[in-house]
Image (cartoon, grey):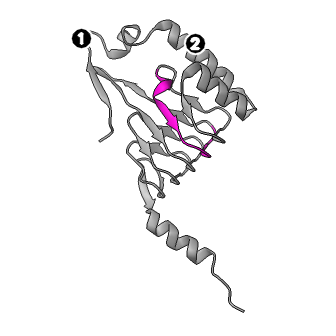
Amino acid sequence: MRKTERYRVEGANSLWNIYKTVSFWKVMKCFIIIQIGRFMPFLRIKNWLYRSFLKMNIGEQTSLALMVMPDTMFPERITIGNNSVIGFNTTILAHEYLIDEYRLGDVIIGSNVMIGANSTILPGVEIGDGAIVSAATLVHKDVPAGCMAGGNPMQIIFTAEEMEKRKGLDNPKWQN
């Protein structure tokens, strides 16, 4: 189960109550900064924008590729470690609005993580250090450190131990 906080709503679906949960002006500010960032070719400037204006916690030398879409309502709930790569057109959500409730959850992406293009990361998910998430994956649960995961629904393809074994097989030490 993802780690999310659940908030019940009365009457119409939760999206009709959006501005009771988050300020319109905050959403507008976040949307504008994110749209600039999505097209920004300079990673240092993009990371500075997201850290300074959106309060995202982004590690050193982390790369958010072209068109990455951080959460427009609660970007401060996203943490990305050092030296990670978030692939083209990936969406990172820290909220979800449903019929009778809305949910918020922190997204924690570790260091040295590779997220493939066109992936979607749902709220309340943690991706451990050194993990690899293949392209077009719906990350709906935690990914342990060092694992390779992929698919829809997401599955663990290789555990950290299996990944280490494969690295050893791919790089045999030649003897003289």
Residue 68, percent across and down?
61, 33
Q: Residue furthest bottom?
A: 176
Q: Residues within 10 Å of mark 1 (few under 14, many from 20)?
A: few
Residue 18 seen from this side: yes
Of the image marks 2 and 1, the number of the one nearer the N terminus: 1
Q: CA distance from mark 2 to mark 1?
A: 28 Å
Q: Is residue 109 left or right of residue 51?
A: left
Question: Which residue is denoted by mark 2 in the rendering?
Answer: 29
- Image: 129 above or below 17: below
Question: Which residue is denoted by mark 1 in the rendering?
Answer: 10
Q: Is residue 83 magenta?
A: yes
| Amino acid of disc 1 | Glu
Q: Residues within 10 Å of mark 2 (few under 14, many from 20)?
A: some
Tell me which residue sits at (33%, 23%) in the image: 98
Tell me which residue sits at (46%, 69%) in the image: 162
| Front label number (2 vs 1) | 2
Q: Which one is nearer the viewer's eye here, 15 or 110?
A: 110
Q: Is residue 149 left or right of residue 117?
A: left
Say which element carries label 1.
Answer: loop
Please tell me in which quadrant of the rendered image residue 50 appears.
Answer: top right
- Image: 8 above or below 136: above
Magenta segment: 74-88
Considering the image in quadrants, where does the N terminus appear?
top left
| Amino acid of disc 2 | Lys
Considering the image in quadrants, where does the C terminus appear?
bottom right
Tell me which residue sits at (68%, 86%) in the image: 174
Q: Which one is nearer the viewer's eye here, 41 or 89?
A: 41
- Image: 26 above or below 98: above
Q: Is residue 45 magenta?
A: no
Say which element carries label 2.
Answer: helix
